[in-house]
Amino acid sequence: MEIRETVGAAVTLLGSVFIFLGGLGIVRMPDLFNRIQAGTKASTLGTILSLLGLAIMNEAWIWKLLVIIFFVLITNPISSNVISRAAHFRGTRMTNKTVADLLSDKNKKISEE
Amino acid sequence: MSILLAIFLGLVILVLAGTAIYHKNTKVAIIAAGAVGLFASVLYILLAAPDVALTEASIGSGLSTIIFFYVLNKIRQTND
Amino acid sequence: MVNTILIMAGVLMALGILLALFRFILGPDVTDRAIAFDVMTVSSISVIALIAYFAGRVIYLDVALVYGLLSFLSVVVIGRYIERGL
């Protein structure tokens, strides 16, 4: 009993560490697209891990927490995809270290044809 | 411990409300107003009122942002 | 022991929300603010779940469920508005 609660609390602490790293990445990254990549992925993983830790600790809440995890896992990539697509078509400046921009190449090829 | 979280949420709400009032860009002001609704909902949960928090989450943070952006889109189409 | 670990987790989540708020004030463009809003929403879902554990009431998890369903909708509307579509 005690061991299971301690394991659940440790998983929740790991998830909160990932949420903190997502917030740190959204401040420290130099570019909009790097900020999207750092913030959204890390905070999604942190939320999933912390809800999973609470589900380990308390077995009566496990189905509702699993439904919340399912919704977060489905709906969060949609929002980051829409924001990054809008920023790219708006012409947001990238950082100087950018190597490849595949969406721009595809655009140019379509307009040439 | 819970009063410290309440003070933190109140300070965050104050900063976001100041941004919503004094910022010059309209879109930023609308997003800040939505974030005020978000943290107000968390504060309502902390004060043990889950039904008010449910209404605030769906109306104040979701629907009002969508309606504001819908109206901005209509205004932009009329001006163009 | 368990309560100490969970309080540490809550402090780390509050620090993450504070850093996202810093980017929200500082961000040079609308899209930066939209991403900061998204991160604040997703972080506040786990804060709500933690409050529900400390209070011991399962009804608080319904608010987290509504956030998981509705939080992406306003960000999608912001993105479509910026892309000149809606």
Image (cartoon, rainbow, N blue to C red):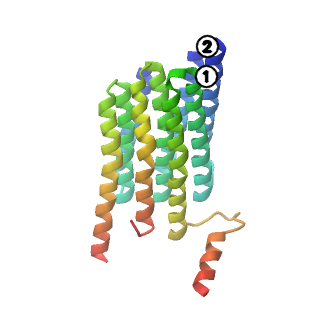
Residue A38 percent location from the top left of the image = 62, 49
> Marks 2 and 1, Cα distance to the nearest angstrom?
9 Å
Q: Is residue A77 visible?
A: yes
Q: Three-letter amino acid code at disc 1?
A: Ala
Instruction: Answer above or below: position of A30 versus A113.
Output: above
Which residue corresponds to mark 1? A9
Is residue A47 or residue A28 the one in the foreground?
A: A47
Q: Is residue A23 visible?
A: no
Q: Chain of mark 1?
A: A
Q: Quadrant of residue B18?
A: top left
* Left-right relation of A96 to B7: right
What number is the disc on residue C1? 2
Residue B38 percent location from the top left of the image = 38, 40
Please identify the quadrant where the N terminus of chain C is shown. Answer: top right
Circle 2/circle 1 CB separation < 8 Å: yes
Q: Residue furthest bottom?
A: A113
Q: Three-letter amino acid code at disc 2?
A: Met
Please identify the quadrant where the C terminus of chain C is shown. Answer: bottom left
Q: Residues within 10 Å of mark 2 (few under 14, many from 20)?
A: few
